[in-house]
Amino acid sequence: MRIEIKGRNLAVSPEMREQVDKRFRKVARQVSDLAELEVELHEERNPSITESQVAEVTLHLKGVTLRAANASGEMLHSIKLCGDELAVQVKRHRVKRRRRRAGRAETPSATPADVSPADVSPAA
């Protein structure tokens, strides 16, 4: 999984990069190597907002895009919350895909076109 970290009006420190790598390692094991994760970190400038540290995460998978956004008083806590939320979404997506694949595998292989008229018994 490729991770891109952006800081909007905020310098991204090596500690934050390390925290992002650590938090999204679980998600990286569950998705393809071709998946792209975009992490955007920014701070709300309004002094009346107590939870001003915002982390927004977008995961681009084949055919689906998953998003998570959280705000808290500390940036590292916001990253942690986003990681947990995205892990739940990825797990839910994987379960859905498995159910769809299992449903297709259980369908009978004989279609109405494969049945010949001789196989059908006449009505009495």
Image: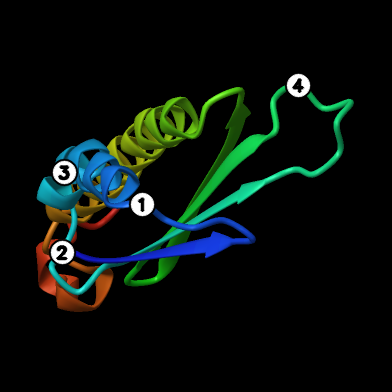
Q: Nearer the viewer, residue 22 or 115?
A: 22
User: Residue 8 location, x and y as percent?
Assistant: 61, 62
Closer to the eye: label 4 or 1? 1
Label 2: few (<14), some or many (≥20) within 10 Å?
Answer: few
Labels 2 and 3: the sequence-earlier one: 3
Q: CA distance from mark 2 to mark 1?
A: 27 Å
Closer to the eye: label 2 or 1? 1
Residue underneath mark 2: 32
Q: Residue at x 16, y 38 (%)?
A: 26
Label 4: few (<14), some or many (≥20) within 10 Å?
Answer: few
Residue underneath mark 4: 50
Q: Quadrant of residue 9?
A: bottom right
Q: CA distance from mark 4 to mark 3?
A: 29 Å
The amino acid on which the numbered mark 1 sits, given as a three-letter code, is: Ser
Labels 4 and 1: the sequence-earlier one: 1
User: Residue 106 location, x and y as percent?
Assistant: 14, 47
Closer to the eye: label 4 or 2? 4
Closer to the eye: label 4 or 3? 4
Q: Are marks 4 and 1 in contact (CB under 8 Å)?
A: no
Q: In the drawing, does residue 63 fall left or right of residue 22?
A: right
Q: In the drawing, does residue 23 fall left or right of residue 92?
A: left
Labels 1 and 3: the sequence-earlier one: 1
Residue underneath mark 3: 25
Residue underneath mark 1: 13
The amino acid on which the numbered mark 2 sits, given as a three-letter code, is: Ser
Labels 2 and 1: the sequence-earlier one: 1
